[in-house]
Amino acid sequence: MKQRHIQHLYWRAGFGIGLKKINQLKSKSKNEIIKNLFYDASKVNLLQLDLSEFNFIKNKSPKALKVEMGEEAYRKLRQKSQRKVRDLNYAWLERLTEPSSILREKMTLFWSNVFVCRDNHIFHIQHFNNTLRKNALGNFRELVKKIAKEASMSKYLNNRQNRKKSPNENFARELMELFTLGIGNYTEQDIKESARAFTGWSFKLNGDFVLRKKQHDSGIKTFFDKSGYFDGDDIIDLILEKKQCARFICDKVYRYFVNPIVDESHLDEITSIFYKDYDINNLMMHIFSAKWFYNDKNIGVKIKSPVELLVGIRRVVPVTFMKKNQLNYLQKMMGQVLLYPENVSGWKGGKNWIDSNTLMFRMKLASLILNDAVINLEEKGAFEDSFNKYYNKERKRNKYIKTIKNWAFFIKNHLNLKPNELRDLLILSKLDKDTAVLLDELKVTSNKDYCIQIMSIPEYQLC
Amino acid sequence: MKRRDFIKRSSLASGLFFVPNFIKNIESESINYLGFKKLVIIQLSGGNDGLNSIIPFTNDVYYKNRPQISIKKNNLIKATDELGFHKSLAPLKNLYDEGYLSIINNVGYPNPNRSHFRSTDIWQTASDSNQYLDTGWLGRYIEKYGKIPYSGIEIDDSLSLIMKGKNMNGIATKNPRTLFSNTQTPYFKKVLKYQSDQHLSEHNLGYLYKTMIEARSSAKYIYETSKTYKSNLEYPNNPFGKQLKTTAEFINSHLESKVYYASMGGFDTHANQFNRQDRLLSTFSSAMDVFVKDLKQNNTFKDTLILVFSEFGRRVQQNGAGGTDHGAANNVYIIGENLKKKGFYNNAPDLLSLDKNGDLIHTVDFRSIYASILDKWLEIDDVSILNKTFRKLDFI
């Protein structure tokens, strides 16, 4: 397989690829390479923090804990457990930089922006995240049904407040609008009826799903012109009966993995495949095997998400962050903080990542984490912050991102590369003609410097 | 420039961005054809408690619901027979007395959302409660009418949704020198030095280069223009004071920018609200006081309209921690020299008819305020920005 095609595949199915791996794969056929990719992805490595210090709160209600510990101690404990969500964010980012994290992790990241959810209960959100990971290449039907039963989702979209006597339509609405069909493919009446089917869907203190029978409306519902004693699972089945559901998901998949500009005939093709059995593995296998996936017009044309950009750099030059909260800073400045989506519709991606401010920051990212460049910009405070905390980052002007750079790894792998070889390794996009002249005229003093330079041109923003 | 000429002009410049000599065009661009009026929007982030800011001091329901945190009748500045200002809003009361303030009560939207994130999105994008838009209402203004990023400036280091358009965004800076120096970093500068814009593609790569070019010229313009004027008034020495000072310097140096946005944090007063809000309102109003003076002194107040909002108000009933939880409708302040309706625009909130959460029910859709500002102040077609017709109010 051609190097450029291997790179393309690994950027879309993962977070880029190192020279060593390319050299291992070059002599292999496309089929072999793809088979390997899926074989590696068949293993599930859950993301789990050590939460033993919080185990005792697992089966207790906030009320009981308040009585037991006192209000103040409970509040502190709560804050401490909420900070663990940030730790989960760091652990997730670290996970993405591991060489073994390719397709399954990329799919998990993709699904987390379809089934968007936010929760500061560390046990619940960790479970949610791992449900995405376990089912990332499984069956979409199972995935939707499991997500609908997750405690974090139940809270985020108010499904636990959805009761027979006073239905809450939030989950039913977003299920169709954002998770499966897209706006305009159902009626307000469909939302009302399906919300009834999800009444009583709740969870126990430990996060396990429970159907509260007394709150559940077991009557006849009429949904998509069919009537029956439907429950939530039936509703999901009825939604998936619509080809539009397969198309809606395939459209997202296409934009994320292939090209932000959709080729309708390719979309039709993958929709038909996905609609047959909603098997995610088959869908992705088909896409990565398709000849059109390797068309020039699909290569190097996607704007990297902030996470792809950050992880991609760290895969070329391994970097350890000395201050974990600086990872949070970088994510915030670029507009994507994992586990903290701004709303249920998720990150729009593509051009939406880019404005004057984020672009300047993104183009400086390599210098910041690889070259100790100074940065004097501050992230926004949070809504919950006090006035002083909201602005308190203000005082620390001119900061460095404190990292340990493993240049030895880079040099070992790239020592003998000629400048144009290094450039082709890092850049998949077509080069702007003027910038190409700039690169040609540049005196390359070392591959180390050249690497940072290459990572600082606009073309590196694309994959 | 007249509106008709502008339309002519904008139809020439509209459509795809890669007109020939894009760089030259952007550098000689002027947006003064949009007139000289400025709009400054301040968000009191976290949800300011409007009921304790403008107090219904004859209302028993108010006092019953807030045994610990209500503002006593003898501890406020009376404005009408039933409404008074929080003592820390004294400077605002002065503006009120001078006829420079209009307070619109009960502003909100149907099916209010009580999440900071979501409700801020709704206010910033001017969407319905169940609609997700990925552009802000000022962003759409910038894209459609301003056409250069610096037609909208956020006083911060990163850009909020309110300033984002589809293919064109506003720009954020709280320090023009820093912004400028970030366009002068070796790689950024070098890439642009070589850029002739002869080969810019239509898609993502072209978009990146176009954004770089715009960033550079906006940063340069803002920095070079605004350094001609330094405010000689003393602003309160805190970050919000600094934000307003920067805004005043932008306006008074006659930057062509049309819309400004800044957010002041800290208003999420779930606990110990009494003293906290006291300090917050004082910080807010003392900075606003100097800001208005600064504009007046420079004869720019007449061309500036200030809108102050929060993503939501707070619950009528206080909570157990001496604070208030997230609510719904709230009051909005409009500050300017040529207000049509001075003082209170409408009736005080009705504390007897609350929604099922115990929150105020809105009587004015916030987008009616936006529509009025777009139509009567910025003098453009409000529907082209809000994509819907809203009843216009006559405060300006």
Image (cartoon, coloured by chain):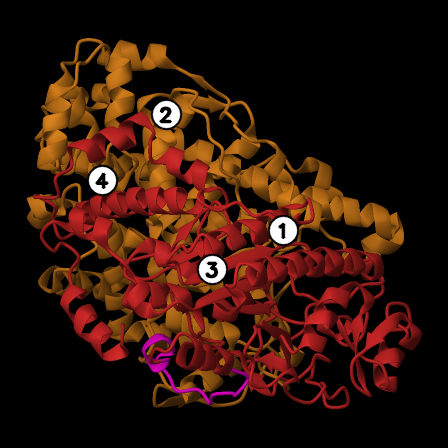
Chain colours: A orange, B red
Nearest the viewer among A95 and A145 is A95
**Distance of mark 1 from mark 2, alpha carbons?**
31 Å
Q: Residues within 10 Å of mark 4 (few under 14, many from 20)?
A: many
From the image, tell me which residue sits under label 2: A367
**Residue shown at the point (82%, 53%) measured from the top left:** A65
Say which residue label 1 marks. Answer: B240
Question: Does dot 3 land on a helix, a strand or a loop?
Answer: strand
Q: Is residue B268 above or below residue A123?
A: below
Separation of marks 4 and 2 at Cα, in angstroms: 19 Å
Q: Main secondary structure of the magenta part?
A: loop
Q: Amino acid at mark 2?
A: Ser
Kind of residue sitting beneath label 3: Tyr
Q: What residue is at 45 percent from the left and 36 percent from the top?
A: A93
Image coords of residue A266 (percent x, y):
12, 59
Structural distance between the alpha carbons of marks 2 and 3: 31 Å
Near-viewer residue (B359 or A152) = B359
